[in-house]
Image (cartoon, rainbow, N blue to C red):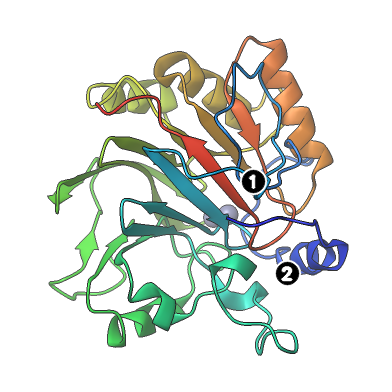
Amino acid sequence: MRINDAADDFFLLLISLSLAACRPNATLVPTIVPSQTPTAAPEEIHTTTVIPTDSDVEHLEPGAQIWSLGGNGWALEINGRLLVFDYVGRGESVPPVSGEVRNLEIGAINTDELQAFDLYVFVTHSHQDHFDPVIFEWQQQVENIEYFFGWGVGDNPEHHYMIGPRADAQLDGMEVYTINSHHSDVPEVAYLVKVDGVTIYHNGDYLASYLEDFEYLHTFTDHIDIAFVIGWPFVDHQHFQHAMRLSELFDPTCMFSIHREGDEDKSRQFAELLAEHGVEATVYYAENRGEDFICPIDAVE
Ligand SMILES: [Zn+2]
Ligand SMILES: [Zn+2]
């Protein structure tokens, strides 16, 4: 855990770095709650409030610590496991700023640090703001590593290609389910992951028949602890309707607004709109790479 003094320069860097590839096909951008660090249990948070993380907050048991890895990339630590979604290294400061150590605290991947975990790497699709082939290098140095891809990016029998439609996988007590989408000429998935009593949803750029697909996911769980959704602050846009339907069906505890390209206003508007529509989840967004959060876990299923 750490104190997060929002570094404006990091923020600008993030913005300039994340202007890549696939954007949700709408013109306006959503906003979220100004993220900041780990939060204590969102005590009855009325909606969309981003909670500034604070270093005084202790790890909650059970709980998940979550780091922004820039862009759409996120890392989650749960019981000695590290789950990494849609990591792209292009926003990292390489080499780090003078004297700075590469680690999760700055939103950077250091394989020495990864070795301490059972590592699970998830990639939704091949667009450059979600997929960076550098992740393949990690398996050279990390002993316990598993890969999940939303398309057939290779033929390594040790990797999990969740081509589907609606693929699933079980390993190490973890359950992984996918729903499928297709945009800008590439196939992709959204992930539902159940691990150690924590249920996670990562949307990627999924945009498809969500009513049917969410009902399908609902057959595996009626609650999502941590949901990464596209923070689109337009009620009529399907991305917003995704978030609404997800909230109705799964009552998410912590919702992260992704794909905001550094536009906090849009994330904030997104959070406010959700609140206006009765969603009680706490909505977070990262302003800086390396920003970290703690999501309390309601109960072990
Ligand atoms: Zn994208
Ligand atoms: Zn995309």
State yes or no: Cβ of the residue under disc 2 lies below 8 Å from any atom of ligand 1.
Answer: no
Determine contact: label 2, label 1, CB under 8 Å: no
Tell me the quarter of the image containing the C terminus. Answer: top left
Residue 280: x %, y % from top left: 59, 16
Up-down: is 299 above or below 181?
above
Residue at x-position 45% and y-position 39%: 60
Q: Which residue is mark 1?
A: 56
Helix, strand or loop status at disc 2 = helix
- Mark linked to residue 17: 2
Residue at x-position 23% and y-position 47%: 164
Residue at x-position 87% and y-position 61%: 8
The image quarter containing residue 117 is bottom left
> Badge 1, how many Cα within 10 Å: few under 14, some, many 20+?
few
Looking at the rendered structure, the kind of residue marked 2 is Leu
Residue 40: x %, y % from top left: 58, 34
> Badge 2, how many Cα within 10 Å: few under 14, some, many 20+?
some
- Mark linked to residue 46: none
Residue 279: x %, y % from top left: 60, 15
